[in-house]
Amino acid sequence: MNANTKAIIGNGVVIDPKVLVEEIENLKQNGYDAKNLYISDKAHVIFPYHIEFDQLLEDLRDKEDKIGTTKRGIGPAYCDKFERSGIRFEDFISNRLEGLLRRNVRQRNRILELYGCESFDCDKILEEYQKYAEILKPYVTDTISMLHQALEEDKTIVCEGAQATLLDIDFGSYPFVTSSNPTIGGISTGSGIGAKYMNEVYGVLKAYSSRVGSGPYLTEEDNEIGDQIRELGHEYGTTTKRPRRCGWLDLVALKYAVMLNGMTGLAINHLDTVAKLDKIKLCVAYKHDGVEDMRFSTNCDYVAKCEPVYEEFEGNFGDLSNIKKREDLPENAKKYLARIEELVGVPVKFIGTGAGREELIVVESS
């Protein structure tokens, strides 16, 4: 949306071309130009059979085993990538598409027959997706060379990962995770930028916590407080509109994320949301077998025996939208932020005080 910025979808992403085309058209209809968008030729394509398998596999899981997938085909597309049968954008926009797609559809239809499900019409998919390929072809390029040229020219690059640490396929609350690495290592594998180029690592979080889908969530407030946070923070999925599970900020999980990602600073959003609550709780430890500490674990048996240990803070901070300096925040807000810094060992560098871009406090380095 910023014409002066080059927006790159990296090679680590799986992309539904139908959805992307819709998003580009939506931007154009609202007066934005998508000429500054670039798609990695190594990014993988989501096809209708991925979406079908995503839905089918989730439906076949027992209630207690459901992952809470968005059913957008993301997991099965990554499965194809690692099974080495995926179709990348360099294939998608070439004359190789038809042969690869017919191979994949033929194989997937054999599996669908075993499930007793309707098979896919490859000709129909090919006709539809060749149209998307033509529309997206101008955006596809070698983004790795493009990024390294920017590095040579001393340009500023901001890498943003989707999802969050606890949804990482390796380090998250497995199996209730996403299908990729949204932790720090995903920057290198998902973009082609080496570790030596990384400067600052900011952990973006909210002044409370939220989660989409199933999985352990010790600080969840499945009650009026959680409902209040959800409404105040507008906690509904951006694309799916699913209501998110909401609760208090978990510093045990945050410290784990800080450690894994080598964070140099925190960007805390939605301080204005908790500002509207009478009381705010902060999880400062887990209690396990009578012992309180900040040990985080993804082991479901261990987590099942843990209880969150809370500290309570006074809320009702008032209107924060016009505050531009941390020292001008209400005392209760400063105490809350200071306690977060103390326990996780990383400074807060950005503070979101409202929904607008200008409603942000940038903390100057001392």
Image: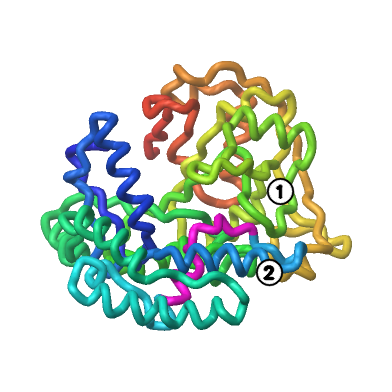
In-image side of 157 versus 264 (left or right)? left
Q: Position of residue 243 (x, y in %)?
A: 63, 41
Q: Is residue 188 visible?
A: no
Q: Position of residue 17 (x, y in %)?
A: 33, 56
Give the residues in magenta. Answer: 68-80
Pick whichever of labels 2 and 1 is earlier in the sequence: 2
- Quadrant location of the N terminus in the rendered image: top left
Question: Which amino acid type is shown beneath numbered disc 1?
Answer: Val
Q: Is residue 76 magenta?
A: yes
User: Where 7 sits versus 83, above or below?
Assistant: above
Q: Secondary structure at mark 1?
A: strand
Q: Residue 60: which numbered mark, if any?
A: 2
Q: Position of residue 224 (x, y in %)?
A: 78, 32
Q: Residue 284: which numbered mark, if any?
A: 1
- Quadrant in the rendering for residue 94: bottom left
- Quadrant in the rendering for residue 299: bottom right
| Residue drawn where x is 55% and y is 51% of the image | 345
How far apart are the two marked residues, 2 and 1, measured between alpha carbons?
38 Å
In-image side of 220 versus 348 (left or right)? right
Q: Is residue 66 visible?
A: yes
User: Where 66 sits versus 219, above or below?
Assistant: below
